[in-house]
Image (cartoon, grey):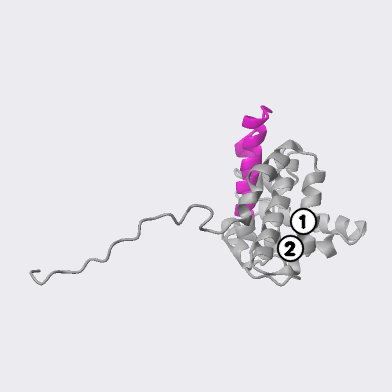
Amino acid sequence: MDNFYALIARMKNIDRWALMRSVTRENVQEHSHMVAVLAHALAVIRRDVFGIDCDVNAVTTAAIYHDAGEILTGDLPTPIKYYDPGIMTAYRKVEAAAAEKLLAMLPEEMRPAYEPLLAEPDPELRPLVKAADKLSAYIKCIEERRAGNDEFLQAERKSLETLRGYGMPEVDWFLEKFIPAFERTLDDLGTMEYSEPKLQIPSDKE
C-alpha cells in the first residue's frame, strides 16, 4: 500500500520515443512536467483570454498524472498503439488495470482524490490535457529538428496538423503567440544579456 510515490519517482526511468533516434532523450517524468506546464497555460488562456470558466488547478493536476500508468505498462510507441482499433482497445484495458493497481497502493482515505487522476479524467478536462500532451510532442519535434535531426520531421508535421484539427481556440492562440520562440537560440531569448565583469588586476601596493 505504501509503494505509490516510490513508483511515481521511477517515471524518470521510462524513456519516450523508443523507436526514434533522438538527440536529447526524454523520459516520462520530464514529459509529464512539460505537459502539466502546457495544460496550465491552455487552461489559463481559456479562462483569462477567452473568458470561459475553467478549473486551472484541476487541469494541471490531471496533466501531472496523465501518464502515471506507464510506470507499469511502459511507453507503447504510437505506430503500434494506433495500428488498429483492436490494439487500441486492448491497450486501454491494460491502462485501466494499471490505474487500478496504482490506486490500490494508496491508503483508502486518499483514493477518492486520486481515482479521477489515474482513471479516466473528467470529460471537461480531457481535451485540454490531450492538447497539452500533443503540444509537448510537437515542441519535442521542433527541438530535434533544430538540433539537426530529421528523424522527427514527419512527426512534427503530423503533430501540427493534429493540433490545428482540434479546433480549440486556446491551442491556436498558444501556437500563434508562443511556438515561434521555440525556433530561437538562447541568446535570442534574451537570457544571456549581461555585463562582462572587468578583469581586476591587483596593484603592487596590495
In reply to whether residue 190 is colored magenta, the answer given is no
The 10 Å Cα crowd at callout 2, few under 14, some 14 to 19, many 20 or more, is some
User: Which numbered disc covers residue 95?
Assistant: 1
User: Which numbered disc covers residue 114?
Assistant: none
Residue 119 image point, x, y percent: 73, 47
In reply to whether residue 55 is colored magenta, the answer given is yes
- Total of numbered circles in the picture? 2
Q: Residue at x 60, y 47 (%)?
A: 37
Q: Amino acid at mark 1?
A: Glu
Residue 24 image point, x, y percent: 62, 68
Camera-side residue of 100 and 91: 91
The answer to whether residue 46 is seen in the rendering is yes
Residue 134 image point, x, y percent: 73, 52
Q: CA distance from mark 2 to mark 1?
A: 7 Å
Disc 2 target residue: 73
Image: magenta residue range: 32-61
The 10 Å Cα crowd at callout 1, few under 14, some 14 to 19, many 20 or more, is many
Determine the image quadrant of residue 192. Answer: bottom left
- Kind of element beneath mark 2: helix
- Kind of element beneath mark 1: helix
**Quadrant of the image for the C terminus?**
bottom left
The kind of secondary structure the magenta stretch mainly shows is helix
Determine the image quadrant of residue 202. Answer: bottom left
Camera-side residue of 203 and 56: 203
Q: Amino acid at mark 2?
A: Thr
Q: Are marks 2 and 1 in contact (CB under 8 Å)?
A: yes
N-term mark: 2 or 1: 2
